[in-house]
Image (cartoon, rainbow, N blue to C red):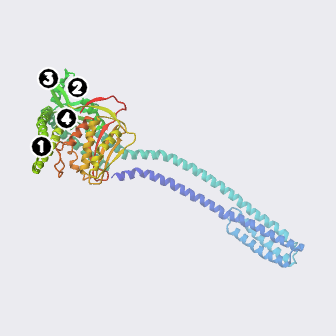
Amino acid sequence: MLRNRILLGVAPLIILLMLVGGYAVWLFVRLGGAINTTLHENYTSIVAMRDLKEHARRIDQAFLAYHAGSATLAQTRSVLDEQAALCRNNVDAELAIITEPGERTVASRLKAQDEAFLAAAGTALAQDGNPDAGLPSTLGPLLDSASEILSINERAMTQKDHRARDTASRSTRVMLLAMAASLPLGLYFAYRLSGIVLRPIQRLTESARELGEGNLDQVLPVSSPDELGQLADAFNKMAGKLRLYRQTTSEELVHARQATEIVFAALLDPIVIFSSDGEIAYQNPASERLRKKLAGTETTLPVVPLAMKVINGGGDYLPESFDQSICVRVDDREKFLLPRVIGLRDGGAGAVVILHDITRFRLLDDVKTNLVATVSHELKTPLTSIRMAVYLLLEERIGALNPKQTELLIASRDDAERLLDLINNLLDLAKLESGAAVSERRATHPEDLVHHAADAARELVSTVGAQITVQVGPNLPPVAVSADQLGHVFSNLLSNAVKHSPPGEEIVLGARAVDSGRSVRFSVTDHGPGVPRTERERVFDKFYRLPGEPREGAGLGLAICREIVRAHEGEIGVVPAPGGRGSEFFFTLPATTPGEAPTQQRI
């Protein structure tokens, strides 16, 4: 087991540590014993001898004081009794802790001298305190013996201190030698331990790195049955499965690539795949044929900027209008291609460009638009005549009408007006879609547009008991617009807001800067029932009405607004009103430079 191998590798270090630690403990115990002996024995003897000398002198001083008359006999006897007991205790203490050579002989002599001194003191006290009765002659030898014992113990303490210092010095050298010897031994054992554990792990790490870089031909030697050997065996099995998976996946990728190329080759629409640097990584045969046909012409396909914009994180380019198609001339015929650019975000950056051939759809749309315009134009002339005849009859210039005839003519007049509005809307929409309507655009302040639209709609708003509020942001940049065409957009949005707002509600007409001042957002907010989420993209389609809405109008107003806004290079949409009740119809227009020269713009 790897655990046992690690323990065996660490065991010499543990044994070495225990040896050094055991020696240090033995040394500390030895030094502590020496210090304890010195303090307990020699120092005790020194203190006892100093006290003995002090007590003997006090006895001598007491007799001198009595002889001088400064102390009474009773006081002298009391001092003698007290100090004599203390002297005997000090002598007994010295006899109990004799440790040094020659100390016992001096201590025995000291005991005899102490008894002689105390006996002389007793005799002197019996002779009425006469200190001359042998007291001085016995005090000197007693003090000399005490001083001799004191010297013996002081010399012993000094010698023991030197021995302790020598022992500490030798121990320090031994410890330093042990540490110096432990360092190479520790490094050797650590190196062996790294060979046991780290080298297999390093080989595994290097093999895993090679495996991550795609080199799957990695085989680790299984040199032991422990955990590292099991890990190496598991790694070898994993590498083998990865090699098998790569082989299988490579075959599947080859089949998938072949199938993809077959499908792309069968498609008639040109398809180009760009890499992250804008280079062509793949193109189908239809794209190659188109490039060859355009090689000798001045026509270029602006798909590379679109692809780079998507690659750089600009979002997929998915146009929804035929107006965003590219017109090319191939074989002396016009062809309309609608580019769709989709980013490749899995497996590396890139983009796919699909050029849908919408030539037939564009022709059908033109035919439909021309047909609607032709039919509407042909219907407008007779409808105008019928309308004039109905007005003449209602004015009773030809003759009087009875009530029933008047009712029928009024209904005919209303239907003729409604039909004429429908035809006019169809003609306007056909002109907008075909680009036949030309309008001059001028740089205009958004405040002027909003206030002019609000003034024009106040009478309509007041008829339903509602009120209109203008909210204009500060420092709005000017926009290049056709005021008449934008007035039509405001009028349509405001009339829809009036139609769907309850009586007495507020309609908000606003403008504010967006996109860091590069665009201006105009909005009309009502507090009506709102537009369902599923219907917000369809309300701008031609002839579309919300489910359940009264069948009034032809459903062309918002479609015309969308075409006008698109012609102004803007966007239009609808979102829920702030607070969740009602709808906010908005359109954004790009800002322009003040004083910009008038331009002719097809609308």
Q: Nearer the viewer, mark 1 or mark 4?
A: 1
Q: Secondary structure at mark 2?
A: loop
Amino acid identity at mark 2:
Thr
Which of pointers 3 and 4 lies earlier in the amino acid sequence?
3
Mark 3 nearby-residue class (10 Å; few <14, some 14–19, many ≥20): few
Where the C terminus falls, by quadrant?
A: top left
- In this rendering, the label closer to the viewer, 3 or 2: 3
Depth check: give the residue in front, 299 or 548: 548
- Identify residue for label 3: 332
318 w.r.t. 549: above or below: above
Q: Which residue is mark 4?
A: 433
Task: Kindly identify the residue that appears in the image at 82 percent across and 69 percent down.
Answer: 138
Labels 3 and 1: the sequence-earlier one: 3
Label 4 neighbour load within 10 Å: few <14, some 14-19, many 20+: many
Q: Earlier in the sequence, mark 2 or mark 1?
A: 2
Q: Secondary structure at mark 1?
A: helix
Q: Which residue is mark 1?
A: 393
Task: Write down the residue under mark 2.
Answer: 300
Quarter location, residue 418:
top left
- Rounded to the nearest angstrom, the CA distance separating label 2 from label 4 is 25 Å
Along the viewing direction, whichever of 363 and 40 lies nearer the viewer: 363
User: Are the residues tagged 3 and 4 within 8 Å (C-beta)?
Assistant: no
- The answer to whether the residues at label 1 and label 4 have Cβ atoms under 8 Å apart is no
Residue at the extreme right:
68
Foreground mark, 2 or 1?
1
Residue 387, how many percent across, how many down?
Answer: 13, 40
